[in-house]
């Protein structure tokens, strides 16, 4: 999709529709879908409807400062890009596009273990701040090797994702026959013909693989790969071992319970990402916005709390920050942009969110993020 057309996308939902039009069906559904009946996927965004924003008047809002500091790292905006696997499947520019757009926007980029571009290449691409996300493999040598590579390449913090001991039941993927790299049966070919730009890019670019593990993985389905490699036995003691091996700032991703948040901090994590993996893991798990306040009250003075899953609007960002999150993160908003138009699409997604945060701060009556507090939010008791 050309830049001019991307400018007609005014919201993340517009980018979602543009992604649906450009990408192969199995690719769009892999981004868009959730687990089981997708109740949590739906709830993640709709839960924000419960919260009203109590705007303040006559606050002198000509100058707006959207910056925040996260684990000592200043960001121009109070959001960043959550890690996501295999981005070259969505658009040939893949993780390169997202890392570049994130650096231009002045926000942290977090690279997935399962990226389709090597972590060293992404590290060298921009001077922007980067975090590295880890899934834990059975093979500890491989884990140590990954940590060493990430540290040497300059990733500042480690994100340990803990809500994926095994893969969730995402029924859209097997229905569509999704594998990485894709296999082609008659139905996939039919769908490919309906997505000619995606198909042309796919056929004329290098094969897609998990670039950080390429020697060890080939054309296996995502579910098979995760089932073979993930260490479902991983526990708190292993997490302690991991933090010792890493020796730097560490973030735990995929927490929804107060007791787990407490234990994470006692174990040595510096930040907690409240997340249900975008509704892709346990269906009927709560929307992060609904558990944010209790976790902030319990541990917010000892760790930085980040909210992830379901953020689509500037008002969502401000609701979360008012209830005590230090920042938010999201994946689908930039992935829809990537699938719709590569780097320009990711930039469009981040611009839409940045403009929305700025506009909504002015409308809410705050000039800087530090002014936000619970007085700006009222939970509607009808829910
Ligand atoms: C296509 C896709 C791939 C993802 N891959 C990863 C991953 O490799 N590692 C990870 O920690 N989370 C992964 N996630 C979860 C995101 O980091 C994030 O938690 C979730 O998407 C947030 O919800 P949102 O998409 O509604 O913003 C992925 C999400 C999507 C949509």
Image (cartoon, rainbow, N blue to C red):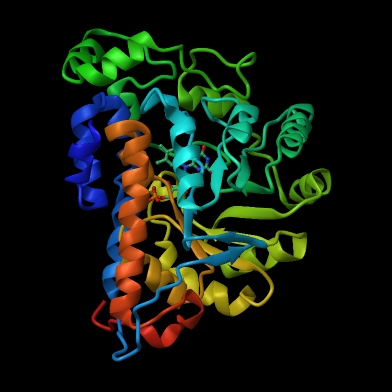
The image shows residue 331, relative to residue 149, as above or below, that is below
Q: Position of residue 272 (x, y in %)?
A: 60, 61
Residue at image coords 71%, 40%: 154
Residue at 43% of width from left, 70% of height from top? Answer: 320
Q: Can residue 52 be seen here? A: no
| 350 up-or-down from 210: above or below | below
Q: Please tell me whether residue 282 is drawn above or below residue 79 in the rendered image.
A: above
Q: Quadrant of ligand 1?
A: top left
Q: Position of residue 63 (x, y in %)?
A: 39, 76
In this view of the protein, which residue sits in the foreground, 57 or 14?
A: 57
The answer to whether residue 6 of the structure is visible from this angle is yes
| Quarter occupied by residue 226 | top right
Q: Nearer the viewer, residue 274 or 328?
A: 328
Left or right: residue 230 compared with residue 82: right
Query: x and y percent of residue 135 in the render?
Result: 62, 38
Residue at 37% over, 59% down: 354
Q: How many marks?
A: 0
Left or right of 73? Residue 151 is right
Within the image, what quadrant is residue 288 found in?
bottom left
Q: Residue furthest bottom?
A: 58
Image quadrant containing the C terminus: bottom left
Considering the image in quadrants, where does the N terminus appear?
top left
């Amino acid at each position: 999709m050309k830049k001019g057309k991307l400018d007609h996308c005014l919201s993340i939902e517009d980018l979602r529709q543009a992604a649906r039009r450009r990408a192969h069906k199995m690719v769009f559904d892999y981004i868009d879908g959730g687990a089981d009946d997708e109740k949590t996927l739906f709830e993640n965004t709709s839960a924000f409807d419960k919260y009203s924003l109590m705007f303040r008047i006559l606050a002198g809002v000509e100058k707006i400062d959207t910056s925040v500091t996260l684990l000592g790292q200043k960001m121009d905006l109070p959001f960043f890009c959550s890690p996501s696997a295999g981005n070259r499947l969505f658009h040939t520019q893949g993780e390169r596009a997202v890392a570049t757009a994130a650096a231009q926007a002045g926000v942290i980029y977090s690279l997935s273990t399962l990226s389709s571009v090597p972590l060293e290449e992404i590290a060298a691409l921009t001077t922007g701040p980067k975090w590295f996300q880890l899934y834990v493999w059975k093979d500890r040598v491989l884990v140590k090797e990954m940590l060493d590579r990430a540290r040497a390449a300059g990733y500042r913090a480690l994100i340990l994702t803990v809500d994926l001991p095994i893969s969730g039941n995402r029924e859209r993927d097997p229905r569509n026959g999704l594998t990485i790299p894709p296999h082609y049966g008659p139905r996939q070919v039919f769908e490919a013909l309906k997505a000619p730009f995606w198909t042309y890019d796919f056929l004329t670019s290098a094969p897609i693989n998990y670039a950080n593990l390429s020697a060890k993985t080939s054309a296996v389905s995502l579910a098979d790969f995760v089932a073979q490699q993930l260490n479902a036995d991983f526990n708190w003691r292993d997490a302690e071992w991991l933090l010792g091996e890493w020796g730097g700032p560490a973030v735990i991703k995929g927490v929804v319970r107060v007791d787990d948040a407490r234990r994470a901090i006692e174990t040595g994590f510096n930040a907690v990402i409240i997340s249900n993996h975008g509704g892709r893991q346990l269906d009927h798990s709560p929307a992060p916005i609904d558990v944010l306040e209790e976790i902030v009250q319990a541990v917010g003075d000892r760790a930085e709390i980040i909210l992830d899953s379901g953020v689509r609007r500037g008002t969502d960002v401000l609701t979360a920050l008012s209830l005590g999150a230090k920042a938010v993160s999201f994946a689908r908003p930039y992935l829809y942009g990537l699938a719709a138009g590569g780097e320009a699409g990711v930039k469009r997604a981040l611009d839409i969110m940045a403009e929305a945060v700025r506009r909504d701060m002015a409308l809410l009556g705050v000039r800087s993020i530090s002014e936000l507090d619970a007085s700006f939010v009222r939970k509607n008791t009808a829910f």
